[in-house]
């Protein structure tokens, strides 16, 4: 089959002399959407519109730093012999969502504990976390414009239902690659509705604050475990092995599942103690 030529879509543009990269544009757009959704959902629960403002001001930059640190540490051989300032060139690609979620979550939790005393950290996290999946779905388009983190070589006819401008961009070294950015994005959109709508509705009687937070880790671990076999080996993190990537996905799933179990056990224990205390009065 004849492959379409790679049209090498534009990676950036200029506004008043300022360079704007599509990679950064999609990451920021996704973050802003997650911020808006969290604020909107909190407002529906009776909280003020600006309740997540300070959280976002700290969590988003922390997430960017965490994403870059995770990538740089995992891919240290890539940076060892390059000028030090390349570490900070995030617009050229090279960020890992695992580090972003970890450091961003830590920063957000600390802000809530310090600046939003009295507000349940679990509730705050559950409101905000589903939107992160939509942010990731949007942010993955940065990989598309940078032509990175694509999948293995497959026949283009398998994906012929996609628009030609997407097919063109997925031709790398004269071979068509699985559009992982799109595949993961669609799956994460499904995960958003699963965590924010389906699970709280179906398991309403058994749902506890914190379940959505841990559900995110379980979901993203499943997504990565399922998609890693499709990834081009050049984009495997760490030592570059497939098993290392799968191991990280399993860790995410374990954190999610164990977290949900412990969350329910802890709350059951506290409820039992509360019941005994009432009886003893």
Image: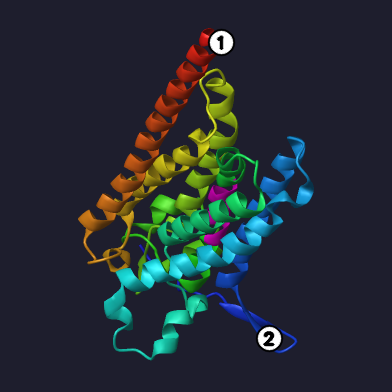
Residue 223 pos. (x, y %): 39, 45
Residue at 64% x, 41% y is: 119
The answer to if 147 sits in the magenta stretch is: no
Q: Which residue bears the numbered disc 1?
A: 281
Quarter of the view holding residue 127: top right
Q: Provide the secondary structure element on which disc 1 rests.
A: loop
The dot on residue 211 is: none
Q: With respect to residue 28, does 50 lie above or below?
A: above
200 vs 117, nearest the viewer: 117
Q: Which residue bears the numbered disc 2?
A: 18
Residue 209 pos. (x, y %): 55, 32
67 on left or right of 278: left
Q: Provide the secondary structure element on which disc 2 rests.
A: strand
49 on left or right of 256: right
The crowding category of the residue bearing disc 2, from other C-alpha atoms within 10 Å (few below 14, some 14 to 19, many at least 20), is few
Q: For the view shown, which residue lies furthest in the front direction?
A: 281
The answer to if 135 sits in the magenta stretch is: yes
113 vs 273, nearest the viewer: 273
Q: Are marks 1 and 2 in contact (CB under 8 Å)?
A: no
| Residue 3 in sight here | no
Task: Name the chief secondary structure element in magenta.
Answer: helix
Residue at 49% x, 33% y is: 211
| Residue 210 in sight here | yes
74 vs 180, nearest the viewer: 74
Quarter of the view holding residue 23: bottom right
Residue 132 pos. (x, y %): 56, 50
The crowding category of the residue bearing disc 1, from other C-alpha atoms within 10 Å (few below 14, some 14 to 19, many at least 20), is few
The alpha-carbon separation of the residues under discs 1 and 2 comes to 69 Å
Magenta-highlighted residues? 131-139
Q: Earlier in the sequence, mark 1 or mark 2?
A: 2
Residue at 42% x, 81% y is: 87
């Amino acid at each position: 089959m004849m492959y379409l030529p790679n049209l090498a879509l534009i990676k950036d543009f200029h506004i008043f002399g300022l360079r704007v990269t599509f990679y950064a544009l999609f990451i920021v757009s996704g973050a802003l959407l997650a911020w808006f959704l969290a604020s909107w959902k909190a407002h529906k629960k009776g909280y003020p519109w600006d309740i997540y403002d300070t959280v976002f001001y700290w969590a988003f930059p922390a997430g960017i730093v965490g994403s870059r640190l995770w990538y740089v540490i995992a891919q240290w051989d890539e940076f060892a012999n390059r000028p030090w300032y390349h570490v900070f060139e995030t617009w050229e690609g090279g960020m890992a969502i695992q580090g972003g979620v970890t450091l961003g979550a830590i920063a957000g939790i600390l802000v809530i504990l310090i600046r939003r005393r009295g507000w349940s950290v679990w509730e705050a996290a559950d409101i905000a976390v589903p939107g992160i999946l939509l942010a990731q779905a949007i942010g993955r388009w940065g990989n598309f414009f940078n032509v990175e983190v694509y999948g293995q070589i497959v026949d283009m006819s398998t994906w012929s239902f996609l628009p030609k401008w997407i097919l063109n961009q997925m031709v790398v070294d004269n071979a068509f690659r699985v559009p992982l950015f799109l595949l993961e994005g669609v799956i994460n959109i499904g995960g958003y509705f699963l965590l924010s709508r389906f699970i709280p509705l179906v398991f309403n009687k058994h749902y506890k604050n914190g379940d959505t937070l841990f559900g995110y880790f379980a979901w993203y671990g499943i997504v990565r475990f399922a998609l890693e076999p499709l990834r081009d080996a050049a984009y495997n993190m760490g030592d570059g092995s497939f098993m290392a990537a799968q191991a990280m996905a399993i860790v995410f799933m374990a954190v999610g599942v164990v977290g949900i179990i412990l969350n329910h056990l802890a709350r059951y224990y506290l409820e039992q103690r509360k019941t005994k205390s009432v009886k003893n009065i």
